[in-house]
Amino acid sequence: MTPLSLDQPWGRGLSATHEHLFADGDALPTKNFLPRGLGRSYGDVCVNDGGALLHSFRRDRLISFDEVHGVLRCEAGASLADIAQVMVPRGWFPSVVPGTRYVTVGGAIANDVHGKNHHIAGTFGRSVQSIKLRRSDTGAREIGTTDPTFGATVAGLGLTGLIEEATLQLGVLPGPGIAQDTTVFGGAGNIDDYVSLDEASSAWPYTVGWIDTLDPGLRGVFFRGEHCDGPDEWLAPQPAKFTMPVDAPGWVLGRWSAKAFNSVYYRAQSMRTARRETVPLWQFFFPLDAVTAWNRVYGKRGFVQYQFVVPREAARESVPKILSHLRESRVASYLAVIKSFAAIASPGLMSFPMPGVTVALDVPGPNDADRRALDRADAMVADVGGRVYAAKDARMSSVMFKRFYPQWEALEAARDPAICSSFWRRVTR
Amino acid sequence: MICVVGATSAVAQAAIRDWAARGDELVLFGRNAAELERIAADARVRGAVGVAVHAGEITSIAFIEAAVATLPITQQALVAHGSLTDAARGMEDLRYLAEQFNVNFISGCAWTQCLANKMATQGSGSIAVISSVAGERGRYSNFAYGSAKAGLTAFCDGLRARMLARGVHVITVKPGSIDTPMTASMKKGLLFASAESVAKGIVRALDQQRDVVYLPRYWQLIMTIVRAIPERVAKRLKW
């Protein structure tokens, strides 16, 4: 499951040249490098133009597993796909999973990823008990949750050293199914419906909404799910049904196609409304993994994913404002996702989530007008005290980054002098 | 019990994971003790019922004899060690060339013979030996490696005939190019297969007691064509 190109991020759209290095023994490169896992970050946090990438291929061994308490020790190159596949039949599952399982443990820590259960479990970093971190200057050390380096390393974008191993608390899994319930919401141009649905669903472990950002009414579909039992064949993931064999042509990416797609999707989902159904957990958590190389859908120009969060108090007013700004600026977007974060503190200094509402939208091959519209959206997010997600970014300005993350200098101070990324050079200059 | 020689190779590691997942018992041999321990730990977490490791100079005849002597009943074995010889260096450095022949040919034969003899006393067993499609024709770019693998292929083919009546099965495995960390930065064509898919083919070949397997299978067709190229043409190709 290596990405299309080792030189590009998942969102493509930018090219870089790298020297490719492979972790071998204990020695770290002495020149400038960036640790890289499966390269699923959308933007340049996983790119180090002109420098080296230190790949984690085959540094993916599981080291020990405590079957009683569900505590797993593994090498940081292990993927959540592999861990889930081994652990699901034994009744365990990663405590937090993002929308794809093809991410490494090291990458999940470095970006402090979140999932549909943020309101219950918080970020991935909360399930990490300990990290073995190797630095180019001070060597390898085991760091626990109370160590100051721990907070800098979780959501530290891989900059504090090479994450070699980690100890993870897995969650108990009652069965391989998810009981899922689907409800449509919106239509009135605000997110009040969504917020009430979300508040009424706080007892559900997994909640997420899909929202049509091209519809002035902001219609959407709300999904909530909980673990349940299922047939044995659900214990293993179905192999990917389809591989995107070529890049999609440019016309697929336009605003009208996006509108048409969104309408069809909404109709299809609304027919399932209020229906409870049981689906394999793989399908519920990782819908996009059913298509290998789905990023080719957006063609050679690639795409950026724009994910912002605004504080809870400001959300009802600012989310519709930001989305209508993007709509009026004619920014095309297919799937947009809306999710509420709870007040569960992340251990990472630079973690993205804050109590509030987050929206993530794909913007195919952004042109200059799209970029200006996104810059304006950045300002609207910053004005209400929100922030934009670094793991998905390929474009925010350094001024905005420093407004979103005023604590960035603490990460710069904790950075390994040999490690840097294109992202970090761009936003800290 | 399944015995794996050269357990730190990418293909061997992938096969070990498959065997571990189905709850097999494993004995692993390799040079790098620390890596072997990690591979063993990984296999245990994945479900292997017992994993023993022995690190040592796996190309030494004394080590091979001692190692095989300690093995319990062994139903299946994989001989996977090897080294991609630098043909140009071999032309200048004969000691290097001899060492490479020892790794890729002589020690491979020694392990296979020793394991076959042990299995003959049990009356049954299967050994998969990783040779290479490179052994089917000496080529400009990798004839040093290819010639060692050609020798290994011929040895396995003959030994298979010898051991037939004694209940021991020898499988010659001929992988094409494998996508490993070393090749990851190459511009890859479609002909590169993952170590995982090659490993699955080996696990299956052992279970089905096949004779000769090309992995992936299309290499059989490719090599038929490669062998058919007349020598007066082949000698001009820098392939």
Image (cartoon, grey):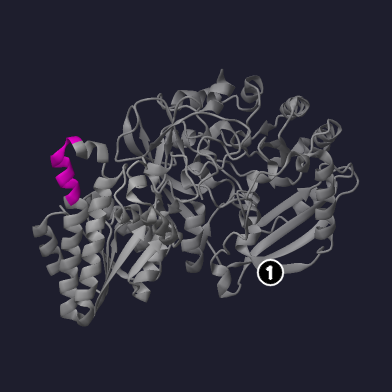
In the image, is residue B18 part of the stretch drawn in magenta?
A: no
- Looking at this view, is A11 or A189 the one in front? A11
For the C terminus of chain A, give its image quadrant: top right
Amino acid type of the residue that numbered disc 1 sits on in the rendered structure: Thr
Label 1: chain? Answer: A
Find residue A255 and report its horizontal and vertical position in percent.
82, 39
Number of other residues with Cα within 10 Å of mark 1, as a class: few under 14, some 14 to 19, many 20 or more: some
Find residue B114 and report its horizontal and vertical position in percent.
15, 67
Q: Quadrant of residue A148?
A: top left
Can the viewer see residue A310? Answer: yes
Name the side, left or right, on which B83 lies relative to B59. Answer: right
Q: Residue furthest right?
A: A188
**What residue is at 27 percent from the left and 46 percent from the top?**
B143
Q: Quadrant of residue B66?
A: bottom left
Q: How many marks?
A: 1
**What residue is at 25 percent from the left and 37 percent from the top?**
B88
SS class of the residue under badge 1? strand
Bounds of the magenta span?
A: B92-101
Q: Is residue A105 above or below residue B20?
A: above
- Looking at this view, is B168 or A318 the one in front? B168
- Looking at this view, is B118 or B46 the one in front? B118
**What residue is at 44 percent from the left and 62 percent from the top?**
B217
Name the residue carrying label 1: A278
- Looking at this view, is B177 or A268 the one in front? B177
